[in-house]
Image (tube, rainbow, N blue to C red):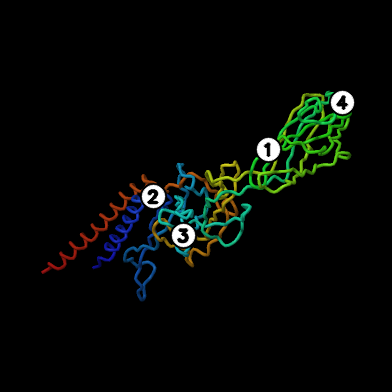
Amino acid sequence: MSFQQGLSGLNAAAKNLDAIGNNVANANTVGFKSSGLIFADVFAASIGATAGNSIGIGTTVASVQTSFTQGNIRTTSNPLDMAINGNGFFRVDVNGAVSYTRNGQFHLDANGFIVSATGAKLTGYGVDAQGNILIANPSPLQISSAQLAATATTAGQIGLNLDAREPVVTVTPFNIANSATYNKATSLTIYDSLGNAHALSTYYVKTAANTWDVYAAVDGVALPASIGTLNFNTNGTLNTTTTTLPFNLALPIGGGAVTPLTMTLDFTNSTQYGSGFSVDTLEQDGFAAGQLAGYGIDDAGVVIGRYSNGQTRAMGQLVLASFKNPHGLQPLGNNGYAETTASGQPIPGVPGSSNLGLVQSGAVEESNVDLTRELVDMITAQRVYQANAQTIKTQDQVLNTLVNLR
């Protein structure tokens, strides 16, 4: 008489309770994926056995399978917290060893690296000096606190409407101090090589029907001559045949910056209609130096720095990884997994590419443990354990009856 079936059933039920207990214990662990047991029956090999008279000798745990279903996404107040909405794993570096996780709770360490609670560094693509993403081998992402260098203005654009009803100016020569020598004026802020702001004022003088001379002044000092002429068609649009755009400017700048400041000024979107003077566009490409004021991460995983001068600059892009068989990953603890031959090699990519999900900043993915289901499974596992214990008890009673035969 064999106790094997009951004993294997007890072991299987105990391991099932272990798995359920582990799931329940990690119900509040961010990024945790629940696991369940897959059981298989056991038969002993015997000579001459037939299909109809073989009795199994119990059960065994065939494997422990992790469920990688999506967990609920919960918002947080940390911009470096991230949740993957879809497929993929964060790729992290631990002293040169790469592992993978769904736990997106990150923060900055003393050196500006984006790290997990255990110190694992989030990896991704770096950027060049202009903030362009450099596609290369993923490396730890670092947020630099260095100032954003100033950039001198090289191009400006003004879009306006000049009132066709304005009279031709007869008072000459042009003088910025005498409003009778021009019809209208507007001003644009530009920046020199040191990031100092300067006021570039432009003045518009109607010299004939559909013809306007444009003058300029920097910080209240007028340039010696007109910077160009705007000619308009009879329908109010700019005559691009007789108007040479953009205007080229060489502006005298003081204060130790590069001088003259050379730039272009474009008026392509300007019009001359019979309506009031209006300025629709004032744009230029320079800016002052700026300090890092904040940062965030967009859906594509691009880390974007925000600076005190109003500029934004990409600081890196995180890389996700997917696997052909995620169930083959080896759990490492601390919400980490390692690749194995069963999982296949990682397939890296940026969020939203291929079959990878998007990243939501300021949020985390909660555990996918269903507590209601786990508690019901716990009751079932308990009953199975009791039933297997009862089979051992029954076989013990039968054996005791045989031993006591006289």
Q: Nearer the viewer, mark 2 or mark 4?
A: 4
**Label 3 crowding class (10 Å Cα cut-off): few <14, some 14-19, many 20+?**
some
Q: Amino acid at mark 3?
A: His
Q: In which quadrant of the rendered view does residue 270 lie?
A: top right
Q: Which mark is residue 29?
A: 2
Q: Is residue 240 above or below residue 92?
A: above
Instruction: Farthest residue to the bottom: give it.
Output: 47
Q: Position of residue 34 (x, y in %)?
A: 40, 53
The answer to whether mark 4 and mark 3 are in CB contact below 8 A is: no
The residue tagged 1 is 189
Which comes sooner in the sequence, label 2 or label 1?
2
Q: Nearer the viewer, mark 1 or mark 4?
A: 4
State the separation of the CA atoms marked 2 and 3. 19 Å
Q: Amino acid at mark 1?
A: Thr
Which residue is pictured at 60% across the width and 43% down the height? 311
**Label 1 crowding class (10 Å Cα cut-off): few <14, some 14-19, many 20+?**
some
Q: Count all numbered tags in the image, as a single digit.
A: 4
The residue tagged 4 is 170
